[in-house]
Image (tube, rainbow, N blue to C red):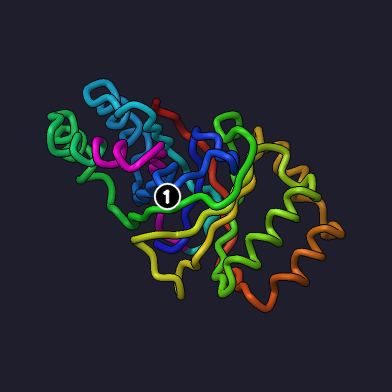
């Protein structure tokens, strides 16, 4: 599975980044029974509480081209210890057994990956629609500098925004090395922005700085189904 959304209820302010977190787990699935997936996840959340600081967001993939994934679980980890605790809970909490028994007949796992934030702002928990840009970057230092300047100058993201470096679970030549996202409070606000046909001067400047060191792999959109804290 190539394309997946990045969003978490952690506020990815640049000052909060550290060697020990935060970071994101991405678990994409394909299903024809979304209501049953929600019911199974609700039950799991009742029986197996997330470790302190861990957040789970169930996303619906709206526009993702020919990709198979229909939904994704985005698990926000505040640090390495939380990731270890969450992983251990899968084998120690009986509710996980019930969850897998419920979802295996109606879904298929299509992707698992980790992603690490490089820059960001805003409160993703206040947004419900996200547009995602998948990019293969050959000079991450120059790309990050240009991206930060773009977000400093450009009002194109009314809500949260961020840039992630992809970690284990992806093939850069297929998935890209980085994902940037832009959040919107609702679908109406996104569609208003989508109708802007002429790129801003700031975005044109960003393209001139990065077109030799980056390649767009895909652009998708997705929306929040439910959040679990």
- Work out whether residue 188 or residue 212 is closer to the camera in this orientation and state it: 212
Label 1 crowd (10 A; few <14 / some 14-19 / many >=20): many
Query: Is disc 1 placed on a helix, strand or loop?
Result: loop
- Give the position of the N terminus as an image quadrant: bottom left
Report x, y in % for residue 180.
59, 54
Q: Is residue 126 above or below residue 206?
A: above
Q: Is residue 27 above or below residue 167?
A: above
Report x, y in % for residue 8.
49, 38
Question: Is residue 104 toward the left or the right of residue 217 in the image?
Answer: left
Question: Is residue 215 toward the left or the right of residue 87 in the image?
Answer: right
According to the picture, the residue beneath numbered tag 1 turns out to be 70
69 in the magenta segment: yes
Query: How many marks are shown on the rendered structure?
Result: 1
- Work out whether residue 158 or residue 177 is closer to the camera in this orientation and state it: 177
Q: Give the image quarter of residue 67.
A: bottom left
Question: Is residue 183 toward the left or the right of residue 30 in the image?
Answer: right
Report x, y in % for residue 73.
38, 42
Report x, y in % for residue 132.
58, 53
Q: Give the image quarter of residue 170.
A: bottom left
Q: Is residue 49 above or below residue 182?
A: above
Span colored in magenta: 67-85
Which residue corresponds to the image point at 41% horizontal and 39% vertical from the top-left?
76
Which residue corresponds to the image point at 46% horizontal and 41% vertical from the top-left?
59
95 in the magenta segment: no
- Work out whether residue 62 or residue 21 is closer to the camera in this orientation and state it: 21
């Amino acid at each position: 599975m190539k394309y997946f959304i990045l969003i978490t209820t952690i506020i990815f302010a640049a000052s909060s980044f550290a060697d020990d977190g935060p970071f994101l787990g991405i678990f994409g699935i394909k299903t024809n029974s979304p209501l049953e997936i929600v019911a199974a996840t609700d039950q799991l959340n009742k029986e197996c509480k997330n470790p302190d600081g861990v957040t789970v967001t169930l996303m619906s993939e709206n526009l993702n081209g020919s990709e198979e994934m229909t939904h994704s679980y985005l698990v926000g980890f505040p640090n390495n210890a939380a990731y270890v605790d969450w992983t251990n809970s899968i084998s120690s909490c009986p509710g996980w057994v019930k969850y897998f028994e419920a979802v295996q007949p109606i879904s298929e796992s299509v992707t698992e990956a980790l992603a690490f934030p490089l820059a960001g702002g805003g409160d993703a928990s206040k947004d419900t629609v996200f547009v995602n840009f998948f990019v293969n970057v050959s000079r991450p230092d120059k790309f990050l500098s240009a991206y930060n300047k773009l977000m400093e100058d450009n009002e194109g993201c009314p809500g949260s925004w961020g840039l992630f470096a992809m970690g284990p679970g992806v093939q850069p030549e297929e998935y890209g090395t980085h994902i940037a996202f832009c959040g919107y409070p609702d679908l109406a606000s996104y569609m208003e922005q989508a109708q802007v046909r002429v790129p801003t001067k700031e975005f044109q400047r960003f393209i001139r700085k990065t077109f030799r060191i980056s390649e767009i792999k895909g652009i998708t959109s997705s929306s929040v189904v439910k959040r679990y804290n």
